[in-house]
Image (cartoon, rainbow, N blue to C red):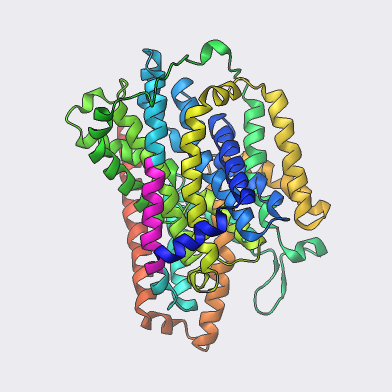
């Protein structure tokens, strides 16, 4: 492993890739720090710009955007009480109260350093877990992959939106839309309604840009909130903003929060937006002074920022070993892999080992760049919070249109961009999450293809699937998960009815 990692660093330690990672982290922090712009949007917007790059170059800038985008959300969370990304929701609980009493510099320093620590711990987990997991999953056949995909869809539909029924509906819609076009194996046209444009199906990039960029722009355009200079809390920071003894007192919190982030990152469809809240709750429950949480203590910031960045390593593990996105951003990265003709999965470690460890090295460099850039350029990123939406949003829309058209050089993809943007906006208005839809759209073809291959292997006998232990295991876990969440959902609704 060490030899391969050294080889990976040798691949990325050239001026082109270093600059690409640097630029990716800077832009990622900018997108993360500005409310309304997210890591999802950053990665989706930049995928078209990687077309002309080598695979490692293109994927390096994307992982830089990922790391910077997740980490940058702490700036507005602390200074404005508005999380720049969903990954920093829990950071507002203690970060902004600290800022209000003049400790914004300390809060920003703690958040930045623990974000770096969480990222590094997540990457270390990726380094040790991914190769071993790949050795196991390389033995999977289509039947096993079908069961893993079903499990993944279950997790996405049940856990992503906080509402079981709406999560399932959103995921099923994604699967249904993914079936438009030519069917796998036999290439029979489906749901084309006589329009030849539909025969190729909907391209991944316009769908992602529509749901994660255009829909967010529509929401931001409707929001009349204007951020003024007086809204942004001032800060002064010396050194890292906190003492070494304060960091030592948080070691248990850091380890626990990183473990939560990595664990939830590995589970498909959960992601950092859930991890930061769970880690915050765990830190409060384990604390000797839980009553202080929410009043402005570093414990809450440490839990939130360590966990949301540790998710990166866990989510990348699932993506690279099984080929299933661990969260919404890795769903975008899956599109980045595919655009460069690379299929993530266990064979990736055998056929593209140098690329895999090059990505590991790019992640480590991204974390280091983030720490340096965030600490030195904090004041510059704070100024981004003041940019008028009337200037920012048209630029983003233009990038979306150019990126969608560049996918296949056809106007149909631009129409799809607008259509899925409006669709995503109304999904949000109706209380549906876009994440299950996107991941259902990506995983739907995998489910169908592996099901059909499995049936070909068993000569059409579906019952033979149950003779495979891994299939039975994942189907059982899926059923148990649905039952548990259904009980919780029933209990929650029963409580609401009794209160009313």
Q: Main secondary structure of the magenta part?
A: helix
Q: Residue at x 22, y 24 (%)?
A: 291
Location of residue 386 (image quadrant)? top right
Q: Nearer the viewer, residue 95 or 462?
A: 95
Asked whether the viewer can see residue 245, the reply is: yes
Q: Nearer the viewer, residue 154 or 382?
A: 382
**Which residue is the extreme one toward the top?**
230
Measured as percent of width and height from the top left, residue 301 is found at 35, 31
Q: Residue at x 52, y 33 (%)?
A: 373
Measured along the vertical axis of the image, is residue 386 above or below residue 110? above
Measured as percent of width and height from the top left, residue 377 is found at 53, 27
Measured along the vertical axis of the image, is residue 441 above or below residue 142? above
Q: Which segment is the magenta one?
A: 117-133
Q: Is residue 263 left or right of residue 53?
A: left
Q: Nearer the viewer, residue 390 or 243?
A: 243
Q: Is residue 129 magenta?
A: yes
Measured as percent of width and height from the top left, residue 131 is found at 41, 67
Q: Nearer the viewer, residue 194 or 446?
A: 446
Q: Is residue 423 magenta?
A: no
Q: Is residue 238 left or right of residue 339?
A: left
């Amino acid at each position: 492993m060490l030899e391969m990692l050294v080889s990976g660093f040798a691949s990325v330690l050239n001026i082109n890739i270093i600059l690409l990672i640097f630029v990716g982290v800077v832009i990622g922090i900018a997108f993360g720090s500005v409310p309304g712009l997210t890591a999802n949007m950053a990665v989706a917007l930049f995928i078209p710009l990687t077309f002309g790059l080598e695979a490692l170059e293109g994927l390096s800038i994307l992982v830089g955007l990922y790391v910077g985008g997740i980490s940058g959300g702490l700036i507005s969370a602390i200074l404005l009480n508005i999380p720049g990304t969903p990954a920093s929701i829990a950071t507002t609980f203690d970060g902004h109260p600290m800022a209000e009493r003049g400790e914004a510099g300390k809060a920003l320093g703690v958040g930045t350093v623990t974000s770096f620590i969480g990222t590094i711990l997540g990457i270390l987990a990726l380094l040790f877990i991914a190769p071993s997991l790949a050795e196991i999953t390389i033995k999977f056949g289509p039947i096993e992959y079908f069961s893993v995909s079903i499990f993944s869809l279950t997790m996405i539909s049940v856990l992503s939106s906080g509402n079981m029924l709406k999560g399932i509906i959103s995921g099923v819609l994604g699967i249904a839309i993914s079936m438009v076009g030519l069917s796998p194996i036999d290439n029979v046209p489906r749901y084309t309604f006589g329009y030849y444009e539909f025969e190729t199906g909907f391209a991944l990039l316009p769908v992602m840009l529509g749901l994660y960029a255009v829909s967010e722009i529509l929401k931001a355009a409707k929001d009349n909130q204007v951020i003024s200079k007086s809204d942004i809390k001032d800060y002064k920071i010396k050194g890292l903003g906190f003492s070494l003894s304060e960091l030592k007192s948080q070691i248990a919190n850091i380890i626990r929060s990183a473990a939560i982030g990595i664990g939830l990152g590995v589970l498909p469809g959960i992601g950092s937006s859930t991890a930061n809240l769970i880690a915050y709750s765990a830190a409060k429950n384990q604390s000797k002074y839980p009553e202080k949480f929410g009043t402005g203590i570093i414990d809450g910031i440490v839990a939130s920022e360590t966990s949301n960045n540790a998710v990166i390593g866990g989510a990348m593990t699932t993506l690279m070993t099984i080929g299933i996105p661990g969260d919404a951003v890795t769903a975008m990265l899956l599109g980045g892999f595919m655009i460069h003709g690379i299929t993530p999965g266990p064979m990736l470690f055998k056929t593209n080992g140098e690329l895999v460890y090059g990505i590991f090295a790019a992640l480590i460099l991204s974390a280091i760049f983030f720490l340096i850039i965030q600490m030195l350029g904090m004041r510059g990123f704070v100024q981004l919070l003041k940019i008028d939406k009337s200037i920012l949003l048209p630029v983003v829309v233009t990038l979306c249109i150019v990126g969608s058209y560049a996918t296949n050089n056809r106007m149909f993809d631009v129409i799809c961009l607008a259509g899925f943007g409006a669709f995503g906006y109304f999904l949000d208005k109706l209380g549906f999450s876009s994440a299950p839809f996107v991941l259902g759209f990506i995983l739907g073809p995998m489910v169908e293809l592996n099901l059909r291959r499995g049936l070909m292997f068993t000569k059409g006998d579906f019952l033979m699937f149950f003779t495979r232990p891994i299939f039975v295991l994942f189907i059982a876990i899926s059923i148990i998960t649905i039952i548990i969440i259904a009980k919780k959902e029933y209990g929650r609704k029963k409580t609401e009815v009794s209160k009313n």
